[in-house]
């Protein structure tokens, strides 16, 4: 992981450079970038314009942030919660947006968010 560390004792800045780890995050097989186009996940720290790293997979556990295909036509980025054997709750992490509880048969998980990249102006 690439990070910058500020040492409070000496007030100096150093960095830890692990470019191979960052490169692996972005280029491992089955991973793809996805640009966030709305503010539906702001309470998770995901904002419009962020680039998310998604691992292509068909399964998830409750609490994962996933790319879901709904009714074979609408793609959504939501937090998932399995309600029971045949229902799924898709949760927007935004206080103004409603949660959707759908039949499991209507939702196809396409991937799980595993990373995030944000550019600052």
Image (spheres, rainbow, N blue to C red):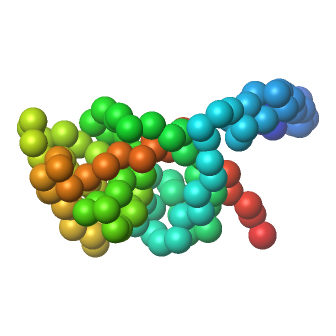
In this rendering, the answer to whether 57 lies above or below 118 is above
Q: For this rendering, which residue is in front, 44 or 77? A: 77
Q: For this rendering, which residue is in front, 59 or 22? A: 59
Would residue 66 be found to the left or right of residue 56 on screen?
Answer: left
- Residue 103's spot in the image, x, y percent? 12, 52
Name the quadrant containing residue 93. Answer: bottom left
The tally of labels here is 0
Name the quadrant containing residue 83. Answer: top left
In this rendering, the answer to whether 116 lies above or below 9 is below
- At x 31% / y 62%, what residue is drawn? 72
- At x 36% / y 53%, what residue is drawn? 68
- Residue 54's spot in the image, x, y percent? 55, 45
In this rendering, the answer to whether 53 lies above or below 12 is below
Q: For this rendering, which residue is in front, 103 or 14? A: 103
Would residue 18 be found to the left or right of residue 38 on screen?
Answer: right
Would residue 4 be found to the left or right of residue 48 on screen?
Answer: right
Q: For this rendering, which residue is in front, 82 or 45? A: 82
Quadrant containing the C terminus is bottom right
- Residue 111's spot in the image, x, y percent? 45, 44
- At x 45% / y 37%, what residue is drawn? 57
**Which residue appears farthest toward the front when viewing the image?**
72
- Residue 18's spot in the image, x, y percent? 83, 27
Q: Is residue 82 visible?
A: yes
Quadrant containing the N terminus is top right
Q: Can residue 6 be seen in this view?
A: no
In this rendering, the answer to whether 94 lies above or below 81 is below
Would residue 95 be found to the left or right of residue 40 on screen?
Answer: left
- At x 73% / y 61%, what residue is drawn? 119
């Amino acid at each position: 992981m690439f990070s910058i560390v500020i040492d409070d004792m000496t007030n100096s800045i150093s960095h830890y450079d692990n470019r191979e780890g960052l490169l692996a995050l972005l280029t491992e097989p089955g991973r793809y970038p996805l640009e966030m186009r709305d503010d539906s996940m702001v309470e998770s720290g995901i904002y419009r314009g962020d680039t998310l790293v998604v691992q292509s997979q068909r399964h998830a556990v409750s609490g994962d942030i996933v790319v879901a295909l709904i009714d074979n036509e609408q793609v959504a980025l939501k937090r998932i919660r399995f309600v029971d054997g045949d229902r799924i709750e898709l949760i927007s992490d935004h206080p103004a947006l409603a949660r959707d509880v759908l039949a499991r048969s209507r939702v196809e998980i396409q991937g799980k968010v595993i990373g995030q990249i944000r550019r600052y102006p």
